[in-house]
Image: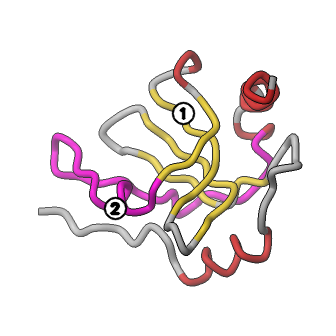
Amino acid sequence: MFKTMKLLTKDLKIRFARVGCQEEQVDPLVIAKFFDPTGGATWYATEYYPAERLFFGYISLFGDWNDEWGYFSLDELERYQGPLGIGIERDLYFEERPISKIDPRAIEHRLNAEG
């Protein structure tokens, strides 16, 4: 059995609280990156809502056609166990930056979703 990684640290909670809601930002700052080391899924968190234990951000699931902005649950990320028994991990070397610097298509997806 693999040891589960702590996905949300005290420092990250503080940072999310300081940045706050980025709803009005066309190019929001990504605070944390989570990924499935045995699959093709990556979650780029731009906001965190502690009462609901929900993130908001850009979700990349197996390629551009499936990528979208939305909410994702800390509890679900923590519970997930892949086929090899490995859970979701947080990129320990990730440095926060605007989503356009990570995936420029994310801006187009955001604008398209807003209509």
Stretch of the chain drawn in magenta: 73-99
- For the N terminus, the quadrant is bottom left
Please count the marks in the image: 2
Q: Which residue in the structure is indicated by mark 1?
A: 60
Q: Type of residue at label 1?
A: Ser
The quarter of the picture where residue 106 lies is: top right
Q: Does the magenta stretch include residue 90?
A: yes
In this view, 91 is above or below 7: above
Element assignment for label 2:
helix
User: Can you give x and y, in whole percent of width and height, for residue 87 in the image?
Assistant: 29, 54
Instruction: State the image quarter where residue 59 is shown.
Output: top right
Q: Residue sitting at 45 percent across and 56 percent down? A: 73
Q: Which of marks 1 and 2 is nearer the N terminus?
A: 1
Residue for point 35% across, 44% down? 37
In the image, is residue 86 above or below residue 114?
A: below
Q: Distance between the residues labelled 1 and 2?
A: 18 Å
**Residue at screen point 27% across, 59% down:** 79
Callout 1: helix, strand or loop? strand
Asked if the magenta segment contains residue 14, the reply would be: no
What residue do we see at 87% from left, 41% from top?
26
Position of residue 89 relative to residue 51, above or below, is above
Position of 7 compared to 88: left or right?
right
Q: Name the residue under label 2.
A: 78
User: Is 37 placed left or right of 30 in the picture?
Assistant: left
**Residue nearer the viewer, 95 or 26:** 26
